[in-house]
């Protein structure tokens, strides 16, 4: 690759990053989120991980991770019709918030933490309303992202799992 090609590619990346920052600045959010690593457009599903919906008579869970494993990236749980969520996630030691984003909405939820038995960090638990803007946007756009520092992980359903997001929130109320 020539020097000119590298400069053109660098310029393109800067333009894309600038447009992403501009779009994020124009969106309505509760708290500012770092946008330098955010991509434009909808993220794509990742092979091997997905959203899994587990309802029973009085409670339901929607978890993102590897099926039938301890690899949980993010978990949402609720009581039927309660309108409240319990959010669970893994985080580095000392982090006491779960920072979520969906389609331009971003929110930080204060969390309780305890040492994780499965990772080198902590296992966090936070409460939230199902009506929080980030969850309402998640219902519409179908993906959720979690920020840990300046690292952003997107959680996108595969087509077969996508309807379960709305089923979960309809159950929760």
Image (tube, rainbow, N blue to C red):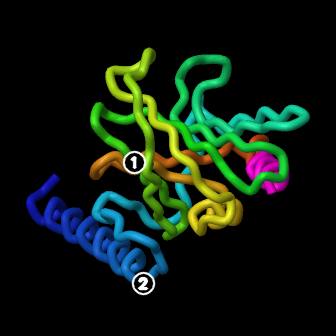
Whether 86 is drawn above or below 103: the answer is above
Q: Quadrant of residue 77?
A: top right
Q: Which residue is mark 2?
A: 26
Q: Residue furthest bottom?
A: 26
- Does residue 42 appear in this view? yes
Q: Which residue is mark 1?
A: 97
| Circle 1 SS class | strand
| Mark 1 → mark 2, Cα distance in angstroms | 24 Å
- Does residue 163 appear in this view? no
Indicate left or right for 136 with 106 as reference. Answer: right
Please state the extent of the stretch shown in magenta in the rendering. Answer: 163-173
> Residue at coordinates 30% horizontally, 69% vertically from top-left?
17
* First of labels 1, 2 by sequence position: 2
Residue 36 drawn at (x, y percent): 28, 63
Indicate left or right for 60 with 12 as reference. Answer: right
Residue 87 drawn at (x, y percent): 57, 43
Residue 16 drawn at (x, y percent): 33, 70
> Residue at coordinates 44% horizontally, 44% vertically from top-left?
111
**In the foreground, 63 or 30:** 30
């Amino acid at each position: 690759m020539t020097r000119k090609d590298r400069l053109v590619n660098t310029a393109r990346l800067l333009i894309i990053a600038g447009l992403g920052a501009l779009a994020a600045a124009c969106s309505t959010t509760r708290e500012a989120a770092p946008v330098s690593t955010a991509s434009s457009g909808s993220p794509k599903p990742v092979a091997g991980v997905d959203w899994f919906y587990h309802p029973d008579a009085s409670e339901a869970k929607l978890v993102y991770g590897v099926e039938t494993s301890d690899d949980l990236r993010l978990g949402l749980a609720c009581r039927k019709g309660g309108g409240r969520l319990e959010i669970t996630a893994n985080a580095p030691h000392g982090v006491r918030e779960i920072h979520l984003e969906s389609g331009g909405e971003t929110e930080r939820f204060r969390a309780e933490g305890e040492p994780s038995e499965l990772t080198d960090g902590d296992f966090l638990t936070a409460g939230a309303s199902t009506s929080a803007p980030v969850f309402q946007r998640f219902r519409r756009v179908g993906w959720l992202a979690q920020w840990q520092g300046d690292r952003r992980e997107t959680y996108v359903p595969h087509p077969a799992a996508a309807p379960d997001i709305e089923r979960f929130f309809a159950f929760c109320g």
